[in-house]
Image (cartoon, grey):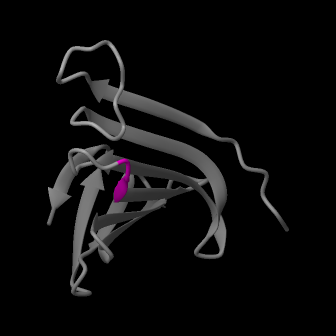
Amino acid sequence: MSVPAIVEFWLTAADTNRNKVIDFAGNDRITWTTNYVTSNYGTTVRRTQTYVWSTGGTDASNIVSTVETSADALRTWNTTWNGTNAVMNQSQTVYAGGGNRYVTNTAPDGSDTVNAYSYGRLSSL
């Protein structure tokens, strides 16, 4: 099953030389964020990716983060990029009934932290 993509994007820039032009190949500070729906991890996700133009005088962007949230909003994958190297954190939420909710966060090294909530208040770590 293919999932139709819904694409949104935001471009923000600081016109550092104040020439009233966004200079992609200049020294302006530029950030571009995309937001779209796709498939990954065997489910439908909303993917938000952020790119920056970090090298002055060069018209080339670098991806700095990817956040993917499952359609049911119970799972999230956060990837931080440093060049071609990526580090991912994951989060999964389980509603157990009776006002109880458990959130499991998985660090890049595979270690897990489980937080328990009762009626929205943190009850244990």
Tell me the quarter of the picture where residue 21 sits. Answer: top left
Q: Is residue 62 magenta?
A: yes
Q: In the rendered view, would you say 97 is above or below 19?
A: below
The residue that appears at 34% across and 31% down in the rendered structure is: 23
Q: In the rendered view, would you say 64 is above or below 16?
A: below
The extreme bottom residue here reads 110
Q: Is residue 2 left or right of residue 88?
A: right
The extreme left residue here reads 125
Residue 118 placement (x, y as % from top left): 28, 51
Q: Is residue 109 left or right of residue 47?
A: left
Magenta stretch: helix, strand or loop mostly: loop
Residue 8 placement (x, y as % from top left): 59, 36
Q: Which residues are magenta?
A: 59-63
Tell me the quarter of the picture where residue 119 sits. Answer: top left
How many numbered discs?
0
Residue 103 placement (x, y as % from top left): 33, 63
The residue that appears at 24% across and 21% down in the rendered structure is: 15
Residue 87 placement (x, y as % from top left): 28, 75
Q: In the rendered view, would you say 23 is above or below 37?
A: above
Tell me the quarter of the picture where residue 39 sits. Answer: bottom right
The residue that appears at 37% across and 58% down in the rendered structure is: 63
Q: Compare residues 5 and 25 and report the one nearer the observer.
A: 25
In the picture, which quadrant includes the C terminus? bottom left
Q: In the rendered view, would you say 106 is above or below 100?
A: below
Q: Compare residues 95 and 53 and report the one nearer the observer.
A: 53
The residue that appears at 59% across and 53% down in the rendered structure is: 72
In the picture, which quadrant includes the N terminus? bottom right
